[in-house]
């Protein structure tokens, strides 16, 4: 990155920050109003593309979580809890209409806060709004179930909300993953206390502010803060009836442990080390493009990223040439500029983690065939990187890098491909490249992962459930059944005799 380009980018981002924050604050949002933290403390959120402060937000802690849970409980037991399915649906749909009017604003904030290309941020926000809308529409056909016990008995199942849902979301897709949780939690009739990641808190605040006058006060509350302060207070709170967390598996263990103390039901969407299996009959050019998208989209900061590319030995060399060519087309640049495909990593911490794993790959004996370098400048940019000849038992292949680093691993036959694909602690997502439909179905059945994409990557849609096997989590998001993640069943039996 040239000095001139870096200077221009910094000036462009400083101007964008000034415009995005003009006459705009990002406070805690509790009981339908803006609040400072009880402690009065704040912390800064920074633009990782230029390492410049965007603004400061309140540093919430246990006292603020208490206030938010109390407000959520009051709303659940009063106005929001009193609404029927249709009324809740209408409120959610009115909210999505308002959010769509602010897509450009939200996309700019998301890009500044995360470092991702603004065009990608806009697409993700549109998709997130679609999920909230989906759950609003889903309510119109939602009914209780009658059970045919006998002629003298009327029996049915009631599906009731838990009450107050605590939602904790990560920094890599702030609006999209928040929407995955907010849609079903609110549609099911719960009220919410949302804890966004401390490094990307801005769009969560705007989502809540844009619900003002549509959702009753206290229905959606937002508490900024750090994991060991606000996050721990939320997961340990006895007034929280349901927890949903997305993040790394080690933190998921802590959330699950905290939930167990209060016997709080929990949904966890955790890490991944997803395989992309390229069989010898695959369209290699298309497979290479898919592999590149699977690891370089969002700078590899995706829990479902295709971080392990498993390639049949007969097509390894031909595929690798195409993979390197595809990687070169993923242009690194200013997230606010059209045409940029690879923005900055989300933080200095994430940049240093990627650099560490590049060194691990080099030390392991794997061959660096593309990229491998950080990019000079004020922000946290890194080249798309490909290692070949990676040992599936190595740290590079087993541990989640969460960066633009691909590991290419050869296999000799179908059985070895499946064994390698499944030989990790995770099972969130996977991919298969083949022209043989029977082989695709066979591999989809044999791979231990919650999602299998065939000749594709990251094809999501409202109604298509997403979640993991093994250490990748518990429960499912995005599907119709996700409503039941936020509801509990009650059996009612009436003796008519």
Image (tube, grey):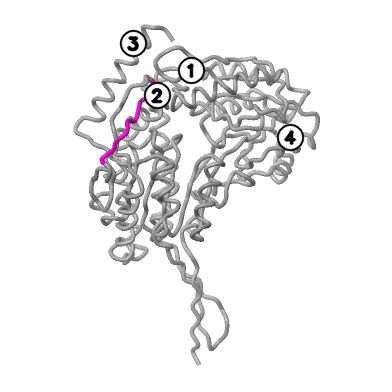
In the picture of the structure, the residue carrying the numbered disc 4 is 420
Q: Name which of mark 3 and mark 1 comes first in the sequence.
A: 3
Label 2 secondary element: loop
Q: Name which of mark 3 and mark 4 comes first in the sequence.
A: 3
Seen in the picture, residue 428 relative to 408 is either above or below; the reply is below
Q: Name which of mark 1 and mark 4 comes first in the sequence.
A: 1
Q: Residue 403 occupies which quadrant of the picture? A: top right
Q: Position of residue 381 (x, y in %)?
A: 46, 19
Residue occupying the point 55% across, 52% down: 475
Q: Nearer the viewer, residue 411 or 326?
A: 411
Residues in magenta? 40-49
Residue occupying the point 57% across, 51% down: 474
Furthest residue toward front: 39
| Rendered image: mark on residue 331 | 1
Residue occupying the point 64% across, 18% down: 322
| Rendered image: mark on residue 48 | 2
455 relative to 116 in the view: left or right:
right
Q: Name which of mark 4 and mark 2 comes first in the sequence.
A: 2
The local crowd at label 2, few if under 14, some if 14 to 19, many if 20 or more residues have their Cα within 10 Å, is: many
Nearer the observer: mark 2 or 1; the answer is 2
Nearer the observer: mark 4 or 2; the answer is 2
Q: CA distance from mark 3 to mark 1?
A: 19 Å
Q: Name which of mark 2 and mark 1 comes first in the sequence.
A: 2
Q: Position of residue 256 (x, y in %)?
A: 53, 51
Label 3 secondary element: helix
Q: Are marks 3 and 4 in contact (CB under 8 Å)?
A: no
Label 1 secondary element: loop
Is residue 46 highlighted in magenta? yes
* Number of marks drawn: 4
| Rendered image: mark on residue 137 | none
Seen in the picture, residue 194 relative to 103 is either above or below; the reply is below
């Amino acid at each position: 990155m040239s000095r001139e380009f870096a200077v221009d980018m910094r000036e462009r981002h400083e101007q964008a920050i000034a415009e995005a924050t003009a006459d705009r604050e990002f406070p805690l949002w509790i009981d339908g109003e803006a609040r400072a933290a009880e402690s009065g403390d704040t912390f800064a959120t920074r633009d990782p593309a230029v390492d410049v402060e965007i603004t400061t937000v309140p540093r919430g802690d246990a006292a603020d979580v208490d206030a938010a849970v109390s407000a959520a409980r009051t709303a659940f037991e009063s106005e929001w809890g009193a609404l029927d399915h249709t009324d809740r649906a209408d409120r959610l749909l009115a909210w999505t209409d308002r959010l769509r009017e602010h897509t450009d604003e939200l996309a700019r904030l998301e890009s500044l806060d995360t470092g991702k290309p603004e065009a990608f941020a806009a697409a993700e926000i549109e998709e997130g709004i679609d999920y909230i809308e989906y759950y609003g529409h889903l309510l119109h056909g939602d009914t209780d179930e009658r059970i045919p016990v006998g002629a003298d008995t009327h029996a049915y199942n009631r599906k009731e909300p838990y009450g107050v849902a605590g939602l904790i979301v990560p920094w890599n897709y702030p609006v999209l993953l928040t929407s995955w949780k907010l849609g079903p939690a609110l549609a099911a009739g719960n009220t919410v206390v949302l804890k966004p990641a401390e490094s990307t808190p801005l769009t969560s605040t705007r989502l809540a502010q844009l619900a003002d006058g549509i959702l009753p006060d206290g229905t959606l509350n937002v508490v900024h803060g750090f994991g060991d302060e606000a996050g721990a207070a939320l997961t340990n709170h006895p007034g929280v009836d349901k927890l949903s967390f997305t993040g790394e598996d080690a933190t998921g263990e802590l959330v699950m442990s905290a939930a167990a103390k209060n016997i709080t039901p929990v949904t966890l969407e955790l890490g991944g080390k997803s395989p992309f299996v390229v069989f010898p009959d695959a369209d290699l050019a298309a497979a290479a493009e898919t592999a590149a998208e699977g690891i370089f989209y969002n700078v590899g900061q995706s829990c479902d990223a295709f971080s392990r590319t498993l390639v049949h030995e007969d097509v390894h060399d031909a595929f690798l040439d195409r993979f390197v060519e595809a990687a070169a087309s993923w242009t690194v640049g200013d997230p606010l500029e059209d045409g940029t495909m690879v923005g900055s990593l989300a933080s200095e911490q994430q940049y240093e983690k990627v650099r560490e794993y590049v060194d691990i790959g080099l030390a392991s004996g794997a061959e660096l065939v593309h990229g491998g370098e950080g990019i000079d400048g004020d922000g946290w940019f890194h080249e798309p990187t490909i290692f070949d000849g990676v040992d599936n038992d190595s740290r590079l292949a087993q541990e989640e890098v969460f960066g633009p680093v691909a590991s290419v691993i050869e296999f000799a036959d179908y059985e070895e491909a499946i064994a390698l694909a499944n030989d990790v602690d995770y099972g969130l997502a996977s991919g298969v490249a083949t022209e043989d439909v029977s082989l695709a179905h066979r591999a989809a059945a044999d791979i231990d992962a919650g999602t299998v994409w065939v000749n594709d990557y990251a094809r999501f849609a409202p109604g298509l459930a997403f979640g993991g096997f093994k250490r990748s989590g518990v429960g499912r998001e995005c599907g119709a059944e996700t409503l039941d993640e936020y509801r509990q069943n009650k059996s009612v039996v009436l003796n008519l005799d």
